[in-house]
Structures are given as structure tokens and as C-alpha cells.
Image (cartoon, rainbow, N blue to C red):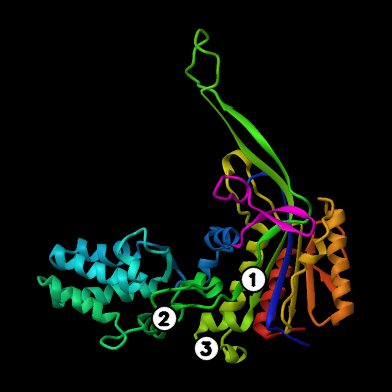
Amino acid sequence: MTNARFLQVHSLHSYPAALINRDDSGLAKRMPFGNAIRTRISSQCLKRHWRTAEDEFAIRDATSDGLAIRSRNIVEREVIDPLRDAERAEEDVIEAVEEAFNVGVYGDSGTTERGRQPLLLGLPEVEYLRARAAEILDAHPDDAKAAGDAAKQLFQVRAGEGENFRAFRKQAGLPGGIEGALFGRMVTSDPAANIEAAVHVAHAFTVHQEESESDYFSVVDDLQTDDEDAGAAHIGDTELTAGLFYGYVVVDLPGLVSNLEGCEANDWIDADRELAADVVERLVHLIATVSPGAKRGSTAPYSYADLMLVEAGSRQPRSLANAFRNPVAPQLADAVPALGAHLDRLDAAYGAHELRRWMLVDDFRAPDAEQVNLDELADWAACVVRNGDAS
């Protein structure tokens, strides 16, 4: 039996003729690694597509209490506007409360939309804020100064409740929703609101040197007649890339159970782990089958994983990225043996303390690992969480 504090998910995905993730200049994101420049997919891009995926394994469907909103306009659109529509108070009163709440939630720069950072709030937190705002409006329906002062006081540590997000967390098991429990959040206006991420996602990168080309395209005007200029209505160019990407995800099981159940991380083994198991099962499916990508209409960048390797153990996780520090050919026949050989070297140096399961669309041997299909792989990962060990 192996204690399971961490699950590590390694994957290989292949994408031809796509522009998966762009930088600020519209080109594919890149990174230097080893002696070559690689195409990469940012962790933010990967996480967004996993958390917003709408399919049978959608993370948000794990529990009815898991919905959350990420926006710079939560106070205005989700807290204040419903009260404004209900005409709870005079408009100047509502505006005073809205301004104070924006500063309280988003910090000193929260008075303008540009000054706010997108913030993730769980629906219980949104409802809590709306209820408190309603109380203030009902108490001061025609006194803007009194309402504004009351709203400011709500967010002052000494004069009011202070650290409101800590109060939210006491009232809701999932203050930041499932998304916050998995991927964490940072609230600059109230450090007590911060949630430590339980799922750690690396930037995916190609196991080989970047492969890209400039795609020249033209647009034809359907209403253009034969006697008119025969030129295109529009011409342009964009970058397309192709690659076999290595991805790496770590699930901190004590942290995940703590975030989902509200217990201390050290007490995770004695807590209810059923929701965490369900979330992990869904996550394994999403990593394997949900593709990030831009330019979907013109490139259809959809792919399933060629390889999924899941490890369960108690030691600090370690990436297998160094299997590709020296670029390999962009073929499974080259990438998969390189991954297995690197894992062999790590086991020889540090000992094999993790239990493993793997799924592959081709032949592969992972040290001390059993081959399964994706459903079995996700179910095994969920059982590790339920049992608290990998056996």
C-alpha cells in the first residue's frame, strides 16, 4: 500500500495545423527549453478550457453548490443591479453602496472597471454580498452618505465585520466554487479570501523544436460580378503550428479535500472524500479529451490524448519534462520511449515509490505500471482519493 498525497497526470497531445494559444502579437506562444525553441500552451489557457467545458464530465456538475463567477463587474451586475431593479432605494444611495462595495471587494482601485482585476466569487459569496447590500439600502433608503458609510464600515476590520471573505467561508463549504477549490484564487483586498490551488498545472510544450508556418489567406466577395475587380475582398496571414505536446498536472489531495470540505489539510484522510473523488475522475477525463484552442472555425483543433500516465504517491511530485530536454522527433514512436526511459532513470536514482496506471493509443511500457483505458484510468484515480491510498 502507498499513501497517496499527490496524483500526477502526464499527457501527450498532438495538434496539426492549429494556433492553440496566442501571445499579445497574435503569434503562437513559445518557450526555450534545452537547445530548442518550443511551442507552448499556457496553464491559464488549459485551466480555462477544463473548468468551462460543457460535457458529461463538466467540473461544475459535480455539485449544485459549485458554481462561481469570474468577473470585474460582480458587484455591479450580480450584487447591485438586482437591488436597483427592485427599486430598494434612491439611485444616489444605490451608487454610494455600489462604490463602497467595489472598493471593499476589489481594493482601492475598484472604483473603475479598468482598475479591477477579474475576481472569482462563488455564488454563496455573491448572495451574501447581495443580502448585506440589501440590508444597508433598507436601513438608509434616502440617505446616500449614511448608506455609503455603512457599506464602508462593513469592509473595515476594526469598525465593521472586516475580512468579509473569511465570514463567507464560514457560511459556505465552497466559497470560491469548484473552480476556486481546484485552481485557487487571490483577492488583493482581503488576504483571508485567498484559496491555495489544489491543482497545479504546468505550461504544456512541444517535445520537439517548434514547427510553424505563415498561412496566407484571402476572402472572396460573393456578390462581386465578373466585370468588377477580380481581386480578393480581403487578404491576410496568420501563423499555424503543429506539435506533440507534453502536459503535466499535479493534484494535491489534502489541499483538494480541504478546499472542498472546509477541513484542515492535515485532517483530509478523516473527511468525506466522495466529492473530491468525483472531481478527480472528471478532471482526468477533461485533461484527456478537452482541447484548448483559438481559430476553431478554421483549424478545428480538437484532439484526444495519445498518452495518459497517472501516478499516485506521497513524495513531492516531479515533472517528466526533462525526458524532452533534448528534443525528440515529433512522433509517438520517439516521444513515448523517451518518457519511459527517463522514468526508468528516475526510479533507479530515487526508487520507485509511486503506483502507476497508463492509457495509450499505441504500444508503450511504463515502469511498474498497468495499462488501462481512459474510463478505468479515471476510475482508478477516483478510488485513490476515496481510499486515501494507492493499492
Q: Which residue is denoted by mark 1 in the rendering?
A: 281
The picture places residue 286, in percent across and down from the top left corner, at 63, 62
Q: Is residue 182 magenta?
A: no
Q: Residues within 10 Å of mark 2 (few under 14, many from 20)?
A: some
In which quarter of the view is residue 90 placed? Answer: bottom left
Q: CA distance from mark 1 to mark 3?
A: 21 Å
182 and 234: which one is in front? 234
The picture places residue 367, in percent across and down from the top left corner, at 87, 72
In which quarter of the view is residue 206 placed? Answer: bottom right
Amino acid type, mark 2: Ala
Q: Residues within 10 Å of mark 3 (few under 14, many from 20)?
A: some
The picture places residue 201, in percent across and down from the top left corner, at 63, 67
Amino acid type, mark 1: Glu
Judged by depth in the image, the label closer to the viewer, 2 or 1, is 2
Rendered residue at 63%/43% (across/down): 300
Judged by depth in the image, the label closer to the viewer, 1 or 3, is 3
Q: CA distance from mark 2 to mark 1?
A: 24 Å
SS for dot 2: loop
Give whichever of discs 2 and 3 has the lower sequence position: 2
The picture places residue 357, in percent across and down from the top left corner, at 78, 71
SS for dot 3: loop
Residue 59, above or below 349: above
Residue stretch rendered in magenta on the structure: 20-43
